[in-house]
Image (spheres, grey):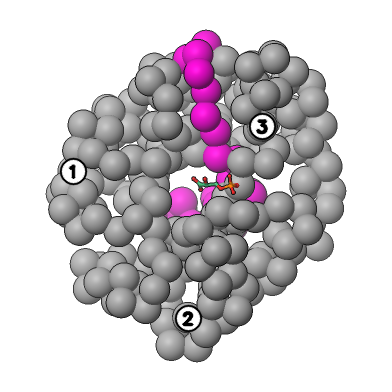
Amino acid sequence: MDKEKLVEALKQCRLVPVIVVEKAEEILPLGEALVKGGLPVAEVTFRSPAAADAIRLLKKEMPEVLLGAGTVLTKEQIDTAADAGAAFIVSPGFNPVNVKYAMDKGQIMVPGINSPSEAEQAMAMGLDVLKFFPAENAGGVGMLKAMNAVYPNLRIMPTGGINPGNVNDYLALPNVIACGGSWMCKKDLISAGEFDKIEALVKEALAALN
Ligand code: 3PG
């Protein structure tokens, strides 16, 4: 997918559910809950051994879901995400070695930054779509306002500590394209198979957006 198309798709979604699955097959009912809830996007994180299979499964069975691979820390995980056809690859931090590796493979990498120095290093590598992590702990809305004053070209996806109480404040910022968060896909609901509750949380989250 072309980067500008991805940015447009993320802007339309406004929210990006950050997901951890312990069993790969959980990703399909979860994907259905997201689609039924009105949010066909998922950042499936490499925080469990099931992540690689889950990413492959979701891409194969539900290609309509905009698929990101999250918490990508290694070249092997970049390979897995790329081979599975993930549309974008997200990392919590800014690792120039991994960013270059992903870019050389033609992948869209959205690395995390939370300082001007990291933002400028990312910009020097040609990036202008970045994650801001951990958003609330790293200065939140105020920090992003200050960053926008000096780097208005950056398009940012904040995650970390975002919830129904603060998400609208982030989405109102001109540099924010979408907010990531785990609150809609809680781990305990996934492991209990309570996908109807996840669907309800997604609908609730979307309904509460300004
Ligand atoms: C991420 O990977 O983006 C964060 O862990 C999501 O943060 P949250 O759990 O505070 O929503």
Residue tagged 2: 147
| Label at residue 19 | none
Where 207 falls versus 136 (above or below)?
above
Given this view, does label 2 or label 3 mark the residue nearer the observer? 3
Residue tagged 1: 105
Badge 3 marks a residue whose secondary structure is loop
The answer to which of marks 3 and 1 sits earlier in the sequence is: 1
Contact between marks 3 and 1 (CB within 8 A): the answer is: no
- The residue range painted magenta reads 1-25
Q: Amino acid at mark 1?
A: Lys
In this rendering, position of residue 20 left or right of residue 90 = right
| Label at residue 186 | 3
In this rendering, position of residue 33 left or right of residue 201 = left
- Residue found at x 57% / y 15%: 26
Badge 2 marks a residue whose secondary structure is helix
Q: If the image is split into quadrants, where does the N terminus sit?
A: top left
Q: Amino acid at mark 2?
A: Met
Place of residue 194 in the rendered image (x, y in percent of width and height, measured from the top left): 74, 18
Looking at the image, which is closer to me, 83 or 182? Answer: 182
